[in-house]
Image (cartoon, rainbow, N blue to C red):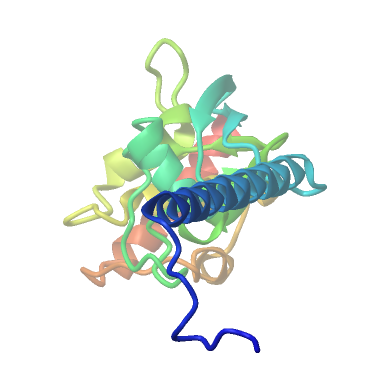
């Protein structure tokens, strides 16, 4: 007759220790295997992402005011942020930061853009011009800048750089604009001091200065 469960001899302490050791070794080995597999998986994903088509490189070269500038740029970083805080070109002002006021206006290949709403990575290979790049190397002001200085067209002047960049684009396209045409060309810029009459005077003078060289 077979022994009942109660009548079976208990395992020795050595047998119990051996079983515990095997169990612990098994847990450790299993954990190590799992970690290794996870590490290899993550590494594989990272490598795949870094080499995937369309992946964004952080260290890029920008052409700004006629010079090539190397800069570390986050993929979601705007051109206004890069210009001001990475390249030190603080003439580009940040007002509304949502493409409404025009204070951050710069030229991309000669065309006005709100730099607060342009991703820096998208301007690689393009010519970026800020207000710091308008004057000649000898310090001679651009005709538009000179017209604004002579006409004292702004009160607080926070919005002045954006207006000036828009005026530059205006005179490049039309050196003989009417006052109404000047107003249309500058309609994307806002002046918090509401000094639009004097600003338009400066815009018309800027066109005249540009014609005379």
Of residues 56 and 207, the one nearer the viewer is 56
Q: Position of residue 163 (x, y in %)?
A: 41, 55
Of residues 87 and 15, the one nearer the viewer is 15
Report if residue 41 is visible in the image.
yes
Is residue 138 positioned above or below 55 on the image? above
Question: At 43% across and 70% down in the image, what residue appears?
Answer: 98
Q: Residue furthest left?
A: 156
Q: Position of residue 146 (x, y in %)?
A: 37, 35
Q: Position of residue 132 (x, y in %)?
A: 41, 31
Report if residue 204 is visible in the image.
no
Q: Give the number of callouts.
A: 0
**Left or right of 109: which side holds 197?**
left
Is residue 193 positioned above or below 31 on the image? below
Q: Position of residue 66 (x, y in %)?
A: 59, 22
Is residue 13 positioned above or below 181 on the image? above
**Left or right of 107: which side holds 87?**
left
Question: At 72% across and 44% down in the image, what residue appears?
Answer: 44
Is residue 159 positioned above or below 142 on the image? below
Q: Residue furthest top?
A: 138
Question: At 31% across and 39% down in the image, what residue appears?
Answer: 90
Q: Residue furthest front?
A: 1
- Where the C terminus falls, by quadrant? top right
- Where the N terminus falls, by quadrant? bottom right
Q: Quadrant of residue 123?
A: top right
Question: At 50% across and 29% down in the image, what residue appears?
Answer: 71
């Amino acid at each position: 007759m077979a022994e009942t469960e109660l009548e079976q001899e208990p395992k020795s302490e050595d047998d119990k220790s051996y079983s515990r050791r095997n169990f612990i070794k098994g847990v450790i080995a299993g954990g190590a295997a799992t970690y290794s597999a996870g590490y290899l998986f993550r590494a594989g994903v990272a490598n795949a992402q870094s080499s995937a088509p369309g992946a964004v490189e952080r260290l890029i070269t920008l052409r700004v005011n006629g010079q090539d500038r190397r800069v570390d740029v986050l993929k979601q970083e705007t051109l206004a942020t890069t210009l001001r805080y990475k390249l030190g070109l603080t003439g580009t002002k940040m007002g509304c930061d949502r493409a409404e006021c025009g204070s951050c206006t710069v030229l991309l290949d000669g065309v006005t853009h709100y730099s607060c709403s342009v991703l820096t990575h998208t301007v690689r290979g393009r010519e970026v011009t800020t207000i710091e790049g308008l004057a000649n190397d000898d310090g001679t002001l651009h005709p538009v800048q000179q017209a604004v200085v002579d006409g004292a067209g702004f009160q607080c002047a926070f919005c002045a750089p954006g207006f000036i960049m828009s005026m530059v684009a205006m005179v490049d396209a039309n050196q003989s604009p009417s006052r109404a045409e000047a107003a249309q060309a500058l309609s994307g810029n806002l002046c918090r001091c509401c000094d639009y009459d004097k600003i338009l005077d400066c815009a018309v003078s800027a066109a005249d200065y540009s014609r005379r060289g």
